[in-house]
Amino acid sequence: MRYEYVGPAEIKASVRAGSEGRVIRSAADLDVWVSERGADEAGEPYTFVVGLDGLLRLAPRRSEHIACAGGRAVLAAGEMAFVRAAGRWTVHEVSNQSTGYCPDPESWQAVADALDLAGVGRPGGFTHEMVFRRCERCRACSVVREGDFVCVFCGGELPLEWNVGS
């Protein structure tokens, strides 16, 4: 599924040309990316997107997902942390936490494909999964908590199917 940006318009308007995240095509690309990070940043998860081309892009954690994506739609977005074990990079933690794109958990397949393409080890799914829904009554975007499909803003029932882009 393709995810369009649904966050604040002023954030999207602030995206500058050439600001997209670093494309990670291989474990060697990841090695260079991580080595360029400072000690403080190396211990934090990074902002990531999977572009429509299927490639993983990384940016510092406090970066906006829309900037990491270069202002474009994505196949997945969230946060990702890595560890190096037995001489190989592996994803230690990964989530679909992006309030700019609000990707559904089914976006995992795009993440898995991008990591496999880059030769980076990964878990079998998101280690922290978020479920986003748009309330059909008040139009607010909500995070579904503990399987309770109720809007935190107006108490309306949230749809079971992803609808944030609509």
Image (cartoon, grey):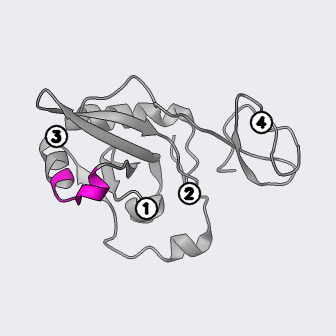
Foreground label between 1 and 3: 1
**Label 3, on which residue?**
27
Q: Which mark is residue 100?
A: 2
Q: Secondary structure at mark 3?
A: helix
Assess disc 1: are there few (<14), some (14-19) or many (≥20) residues with their C-alpha within 10 Å of its C-alpha: few
Q: CA distance from mark 1 to mark 4?
A: 30 Å
On the image, the x and y values in percent for residue 119 come to: 19, 33
Q: Earlier in the sequence, mark 4 or mark 3?
A: 3
State whether residue 113 appears in this view. yes
**Label 4, on which residue?**
159
Q: Earlier in the sequence, mark 1 or mark 3?
A: 3
Foreground label between 2 and 1: 1
Under mark 3, the amino acid is Ala
Under mark 4, the amino acid is Pro
Assess disc 3: are there few (<14), some (14-19) or many (≥20) residues with their C-alpha within 10 Å of its C-alpha: some
Side of 67 relative to 162 (left or right): left
Tell me: residue 98, above or below residue 82. Answer: below
- Is residue 150 part of the magenta span, yes or no? no
**Residue situated in front as seen by the camera: 77 or 95:** 95
Q: Earlier in the sequence, mark 3 or mark 2?
A: 3
The picture quadrant where one finds residue 70 is bottom left
At horizontal 70% and vertical 37% (from top left) the residue drawn is 144
Q: CA distance from mark 2 to mark 4?
A: 19 Å
**Label 1, on which residue?**
62
At horizontal 42% and vertical 31% (from top left) the residue drawn is 109
On the image, the x and y values in percent for residue 47 come to: 40, 53
Tag 1 and tag 4, C-beta contact below 8 Å: no
**Which residues fall within the magenta stretch?**
34-42
On the image, the x and y values in percent for residue 13 come to: 52, 76
Q: Earlier in the sequence, mark 2 or mark 4?
A: 2
Side of 132 relative to 129 (left or right): right
